[in-house]
Image (tube, grey):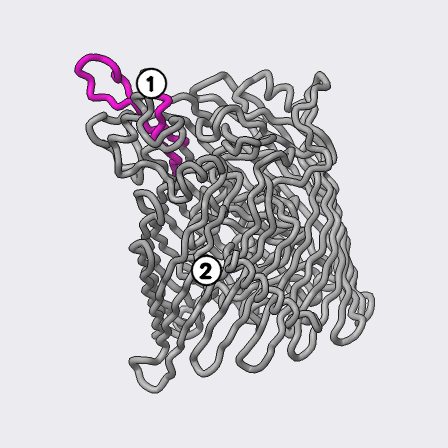
Amino acid sequence: MKHHLLLSAASIALALAAAPAFAADAPAPAAAAPADTAANTEVDAVIVIGQGQSRQVQALKDDAIALEAAGSSPLKAIDKLPGVTFQSSDAFGSYEWSTRISIRGFNQNQLGFTLDGIPLGDMSYGNHNGLHISRAITSENIGRLELAQGAGSLATASTSNLGGTLQFFSRNPSEAFGAQTNVTVGSDNMYRLFGRVDTGAIEALGGLRGYVSVADQSTDKWKGGGEQKQRQYEIKAVLPLGEGDLTAFYNRSERREQDYQDLSFEMIKRLGRNWDNTQPNWALAVAAGRAYLTGGTLPAPFATVDDAYYSGAGIRDDNLYGASLNLPINDMVKLNATAYGHTNEGQGLWYTPYVPSPGFGTVGSTAAPLSIRTTEYDLDRKGLIGGLTIDLGAHEVTTGFWTEKNDFNQARRFYAETAAAPSRDPLDFQSNPFFTQWQYKFETKTTTGYVSDAWTVNDALKVNFGFKAVKVENSVTRIAGNPLAGTIESKDSFLPQVGFVYKATPDVEVFGGYTENMAAYVSAATAGPFASQDQARVNYIAKTLEPESSKTFEGGLRYRNDRFQGVAALYHVTFENRLLAVAQGSSIQGNAPVLSNVGSVETNGIELAGTYELSDAWSVYASYSYNDSQYQDNVVAADGTVRARTKDKTVVNTPKNIFKGELSYDLGGFYSKLGVAYTGERYYTYENIGGLAPSTTVADLTLGYRFGDDNAWTKGLEIQANITNLTDEDYVSTIGSGGFTNNDTAGTAQTVLTAPPRQFFVSVKKAF
């Protein structure tokens, strides 16, 4: 409580410091064209509030990401922006099972994500249409990121962005030859090595420039046994073509991470926040499995067999590549085109006591009373994005398209283990299964097109209007398991977007807009219309189900002067045809959910954000968000039975109040940042009966020093220290890790993860 009071007082002080005015002391970020990777060089402030935009937009420069602990997800950096809630059960925000981001009441799979314009899908843990940003690119190679809280531009390549859109832009290769090496060590035997070499412009090859980078990171889990590690290789090249350029890249990620056990409030009370899976205690996991299968007494301290398993893990290998052409055709017309591809091979696994290895219980058998269950992913998608910008004086017309073909193979398999000792490594790809429960092949064809006009009415007023059309076809073919075949279509030929920005004075502008959007169905055996794995149900859904849609109104005021930049915004969102997948049994058992339209959600909110430069060395940033998201309907069965009384209840994982504050110092080589984040209480129950995660106040601290250029040894040298969870708060971070439930008065739903304790990291960086 003492820590909460102190940090809350500090938060209020930061807010008051930023309150006198809100402004934008920087040029607006460039439009989010698919290959707009150079725009980060035009951003002068670390946080840029989207001057000149008709939508609520903020951009973060690479400086902001670099202040986080090395290896941190860029999602952790945007947590400071208004309207954003980010949670993770690791210090870096990169453990994918636990990572959750929500914006204005929309959860992660209802947002849009792109890298250099290339779609990343909805970044779901179970890969089906993309990959997580932490696998798409190393944080050191991100040049800029841009958040549109309400709606992305019409050109955004996404079919999930009912809510906000987050666009990442990679850094461009340097014009001069150089190299960068970073070494980081820290808590729980963490280390990270990063190296990058820039070729500089090679005049003999027409000014071609590029870079190659490698990153290697490993850390033990902060509780329980096991480790989380990743290795990434990245190449990017840019070839100037007159006033345009041709860009190509290839990024590879090899990620291996062992899981933390999903907890319940009851488990935390009974077993403590540091309870986890049993690894390396194989004998305990075997004893629990044997007792469950034979009806014996579970070993202490187990109350149920789901209290802990031996281990769980996520294994992902990704290859992401593409080429982009940006070329002025003449003084009026500019062309941009991007071709891309992405392959993924992955397994999500856990040691299940529900299915024993073959032979268990027979005389002389060495089989274990458990097995490894996997969900396996094999994804291959290819796409093309194109656009034209036509300058007609007062009117700037843009038109473009996005098309993608995604082949996705998903399977559920089981692998045998031995009772005496584990014979398999959970961080390896498993082979030689003894049983394939199901396997399906999915094909998703996506086609979108858009046209828009930005009309400069006069020097003060600009109006934009346009629309996009979306068509997505999802088909399934059975390989093993229940018979299943068919095609489901999501389609809308007119999704409008209109907006305006009016410059009332040189320092003040007013903006507003309206956007409609639709989320396409997903193709997977564990999510979306095909997750029932039931032909009759899929046939019924194809005829009756409607895709989710949203209508967003937003407006606000921006102010800027020499020391301030800030924004105040209001918004109203209607979210219709909400789809609810009701899980059957515990989440980790993977039983098929039931999908149906269950009504609508209405959201109203306010967002405030501002940065104030106290002096040449000191600056303060603060943001406050109020969000009220409520279900408008009960969940009612076809026979009229009320399955869940959700009407007028608060949407899950949606805090009403969020406050973020930062105090920064940078002068004479020394720099520091103290960040404080308050997140209001959140429900993981649809009916708001039980399942309320308390509010949290958490602080992080960054301290660093950049050495001067006095000699070759110190030139380009930098040392940075990071302390996460500075006051060592004990709190629940992620909720909904095991899904959401109607109610949980007993607190037994295993769907929360605790936050890591205070951790320390030190980085040494050297530029050559």
User: Dot 2 lies on which element?
Assistant: loop
Please identify the dominant SS of the magenta region.
Answer: loop
Residue 325 visible in the shown view: no
Residue 361 placement, left or right of 204: left
- Quadrant of the frame with the C terminus: bottom left
Relative to 232, is 552 on the left or the right? right
Q: Position of residue 696 (x, y in %)?
A: 54, 52
Position of residue 266 measured from the top left corner of the image (x, y, whole percent):
47, 35
**Above-or-below relation of 360 to 36:** above
**Which residue is tagged 2?**
727
- Tell me which numbered mark, 1 or 2, is placed earlier along the sequence: 1
354 is within the stretch colored magenta: yes
Report which quarter residue 634 is drawn in.
top right
Vertical side of 392 occupied by 382: above or below: above
Q: Which mark is in front, 1 or 2?
A: 2
Which amino acid type is shown beneath numbered disc 2? Thr
Q: Residue at x 39, y 64 (%)?
A: 211
Q: Nearer the viewer, residue 251 or 519?
A: 519
Find out whether the residues at labels 1 and 2 contact each other: C-beta distance under 8 Å.
no
- Observer-nearest of 625 and 296: 296
Point out the residue furthest to the left here: 364
* Residue 361 belongs to magenta span: yes
Q: Residues within 10 Å of mark 2 (few under 14, many from 20)?
A: some
Toward which corner of the image does residue 668 lie, by quadrant? bottom left
Task: State the extent of the magenta-drawn residues as a range.
Answer: 346-375
In the current view of this chain or complex, which residue is farthest to the bottom? 710
Q: How far apart are marks 1 and 2 (CA)?
A: 44 Å
Amino acid type of the residue tagged 1 in the rendering? Leu
What number is the disc on residue 399? none
Q: Find disc 1 in the rendering and name its residue.
A: 293
Indicate left or right for 637 with 728 as reference. Answer: right
Question: Is 477 above or below relative to 653?
Answer: above
